[in-house]
């Protein structure tokens, strides 16, 4: 949650606010009021691979053509290794 809040707290604004912020500094200023729970309502956030399997399988069951997974942290290796081993095979088999 700390990584998601640090990296994505500027990406939770709904229109018209996001339309009216035209400079990165404006997003940063607005984001000072964003709480971790605000990020959780906009982004799938968990450190538990099984939780991600469940959420992604729910999305796959809706009939999407594909799912694109993105880790917002700067250290990608652990994310890629964990998802490659524990999440992607489960979601692929469920689809």
Image (cartoon, rainbow, N blue to C red):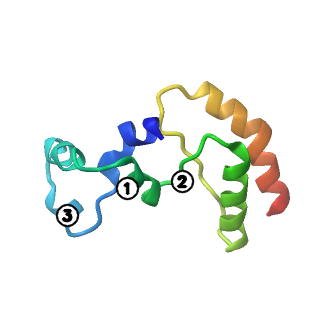
Question: Left or right: 14 with respect to 71?
Answer: left
| SS for callout 1 | helix
Q: Residues within 10 Å of mark 2 (few under 14, many from 20)?
A: some
N-terminal label among 1 and 3: 3
Quadrant assignment for the C terminus: bottom right
Gap in angstroms between the C-alphas marked 3 and 2: 22 Å
| SS for callout 2 | loop
Question: Left or right: 41 with respect to 49?
Answer: left
Which residue in the protein does label 3 denote? Answer: 17
Which label belongs to residue 44?
2
N-terminal label among 2 and 1: 1
Which label belongs to residue 38?
1
Check contact, mark 3 vs mark 2: CB within 8 A. Answer: no
Q: Residues within 10 Å of mark 1 (few under 14, many from 20)?
A: some
N-terminal label among 3 and 2: 3
Residue 54 locus on image (x, y percent): 72, 58
**Residue shown at 23%/60% (left/top)?**
18
**Residue shown at 39%/42% (left/top)?**
5
Residue 57 locus on image (x, y percent): 73, 62
Whether residue 16 is visible, yes or no, is yes
Q: How many marks?
A: 3
């Amino acid at each position: 949650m700390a990584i998601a809040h640090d990296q994505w707290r500027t990406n939770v604004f709904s229109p018209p606010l996001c339309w009216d912020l035209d400079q990165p500094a404006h997003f940063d200023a607005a984001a000072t009021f964003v709480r971790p729970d605000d990020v959780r309502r906009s982004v799938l956030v968990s450190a538990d691979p099984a939780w991600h399997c469940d959420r992604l399988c729910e999305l796959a069951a809706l009939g999407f053509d594909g799912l694109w997974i993105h880790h917002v942290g700067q250290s990608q290796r652990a994310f890629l290794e964990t998802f490659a081993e524990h999440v992607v095979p489960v979601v692929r088999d469920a689809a």
